[in-house]
Image (spheres, rainbow, N blue to C red):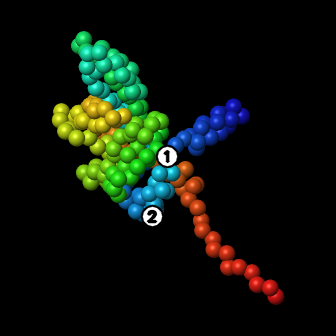
């Protein structure tokens, strides 16, 4: 009897887990989602994203990170952990989205389609060198760590499938 209860408990635990899969352009096309529908989807990060910027002497403005001392310099660090939920704040083009992981209109990262990685929406940065890229976040310029270049957007497909609506057109009624 104890084994059955344990099995049911474990089965219910796994059945409530998220079914996260990479978000792709072909997924959007296959489901015919509009921009407004995409903005209603809950997105998640696949990998940790670590952003750092060096603070100049006397500059102690911190956006959402924490101050660290690295080689005697002040560094602002923002960590967006794998699995962090985010929302689309803007869709500048069909292959690019601005996704926010915290409150604030300027607190977003750019994700875009990369055909080299299966059409996933990956973190976009400029000047990728040595695995590090330059991004703009909260009106400041940050550098990513090397692991961030592998980050892409994921969605919980089960929640999306549950939210899809069916359409019914009423034919009307006539008096007999």
- The residue drawn where x is 38% and y is 23% is 62
Label 1 or label 2, whichever comes before in sequence order = 2
> In this orientation, does residue 20 appear?
no
* Label 2 Cα neighbours within 10 Å, binned few <14 / some 14-19 / many ≥20: few
* 130, above or below 67, in the image: below
Look at mark 1 in the image and give the residue it sits on: 42
Number of labels in the image equals 2
Q: Quadrant of the N terminus?
A: top right
- The residue drawn where x is 40% and y is 37% is 107
Image location (x, y in percent) of residue 32: 45, 64
Q: Quadrant of the C terminus?
A: bottom right
* 22, above or below 32, in the image: above
Image location (x, y in percent) of residue 48: 37, 33
- The residue drawn where x is 46% and y is 60% is 33
- The residue drawn where x is 22% and y is 41% is 126
> In this orientation, does residue 1 appear?
yes
Image location (x, y in percent) of residue 138: 36, 34
Residue 32 - label:
2
């Amino acid at each position: 009897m104890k084994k059955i209860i344990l099995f049911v408990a474990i089965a219910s635990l796994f059945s409530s887990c998220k079914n996260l899969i990479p978000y792709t352009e072909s997924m959007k096309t296959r489901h015919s989602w509009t921009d407004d529908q995409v903005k209603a989807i809950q997105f998640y990060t696949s990998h940790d994203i670590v952003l750092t910027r060096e603070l100049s002497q006397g500059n102690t403005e911190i956006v959402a990170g924490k101050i660290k001392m690295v080689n005697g310099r002040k560094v602002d660090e923002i960590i967006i952990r794998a699995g962090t939920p985010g929302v689309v704040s803007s869709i500048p083009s069909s292959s690019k989205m601005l996704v926010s992981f915290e409150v604030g209109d300027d607190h977003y990262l750019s994700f875009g389609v990369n055909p080299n990685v299966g059409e996933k929406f990956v973190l976009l940065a400029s000047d990728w060198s040595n695995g590090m890229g330059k991004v703009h976040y909260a009106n400041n310029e940050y550098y990513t760590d090397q692991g961030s270049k592998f980050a892409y957007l994921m969605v919980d497909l089960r929640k999306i499938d549950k939210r899809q609506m069916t359409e019914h057109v009423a034919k009307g009624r006539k008096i007999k």
